[in-house]
Image (cartoon, grey):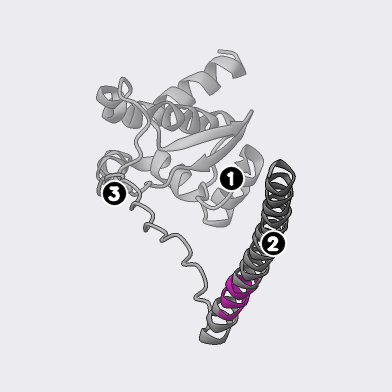
Amino acid sequence: MSDATAQQKIRGAYGRGYHDAMKAMEKQDHMTTPAKIAKAEQAVNGIALKVLEATPMQEAWTLARILGELKRTGCNISTDVALGCLSTMARTGLVKEVEPRTFQRVTAKPRTPLAVVESAPEVKAQAPAPAPAVAPPRPKERDTLTKLADLSAGVRAMAQQFTDLAVAIDDVALEVEDRIAGHAEDSQKLNQLRALLKGIGA
């Protein structure tokens, strides 16, 4: 029997118990809830459980580092057996292969409750308030002194008009008087002429 065949048999022997226990769960998605991970970890036993416990949760370790941790705890297994256990647990979601031959144990992710977003109350648009009516500016009231000054000026203007009218009447009266005096003189001359003609005729 060759060494490769012997290693395969050893690997199969150590991994068979774990593989059988996890066979029903290989078709499921990677487990993230605490209940699913706890159930899967309960099914792990033997060498596979020791490999799982040696795989850290906080960071990814290489296969060589995981083997070193196993040796520190007193578990000496071959590289092929450890790799077989890790590969099987990676398929079931207990560990994840971050890089080739580098593994990290999967931790449960608590479910975050969905936040209920309350819709803001609908604000109805209000029509703008009508602008207050602006009263037209009131004309400034003229003070009493200004009014009296205007009345006085009007009276003076009327007095001047009356004065001018009186002067015009006087002028017309003088003109009429001159005309009457002229007619009286003409009448006197006419009477003298008539008396002269009568004296000649006699």
Answer few, some or many: residues within 10 Å of disc 2's Cα (few below 14, many 20 plus, some between 14 and 19). few
- The magenta-colored residue range is 152-160
Mark 3, residue position:
120
Identify the residue at horizontal 30%, vertical 29% (top origin): 22
Residue 66, numbered label: 1
In the picture, measured across the screen, residue 175 lies left or right of residue 35, that is: right
Identify the residue at horizontal 69%, vertical 56% (top origin): 179
Verify CB contact (< 8 Å) between mark 2 and mark 3.
no
Task: Residue 114 in the image: state x and y as whole percent.
Answer: 29, 45
Answer few, some or many: residues within 10 Å of disc 1's Cα (few below 14, many 20 plus, some between 14 and 19). many
Answer few, some or many: residues within 10 Å of disc 3's Cα (few below 14, many 20 plus, some between 14 and 19). few
Q: Residue furthest front?
A: 202
Amino acid found under the numbered disc labelled 3: Ala
Q: Earlier in the sequence, mark 2 or mark 3?
A: 3
Task: Residue 7 in the image: state x and y as whole percent.
Answer: 54, 23
Identify the residue at horizontal 51%, vertical 31% (top origin): 81
Residue 181, numbered label: 2
Task: Considering the whole magenta stretch, tell me its main secondary structure.
Answer: helix
Amino acid found under the numbered disc labelled 2: Ala
Residue 125 placement: quadrant: top left
Q: Give me the C-alpha separation between circle 1 and circle 3.
A: 54 Å
Q: Secondary structure at mark 2?
A: helix
Q: Nearer the viewer, mark 2 or mark 1?
A: 2
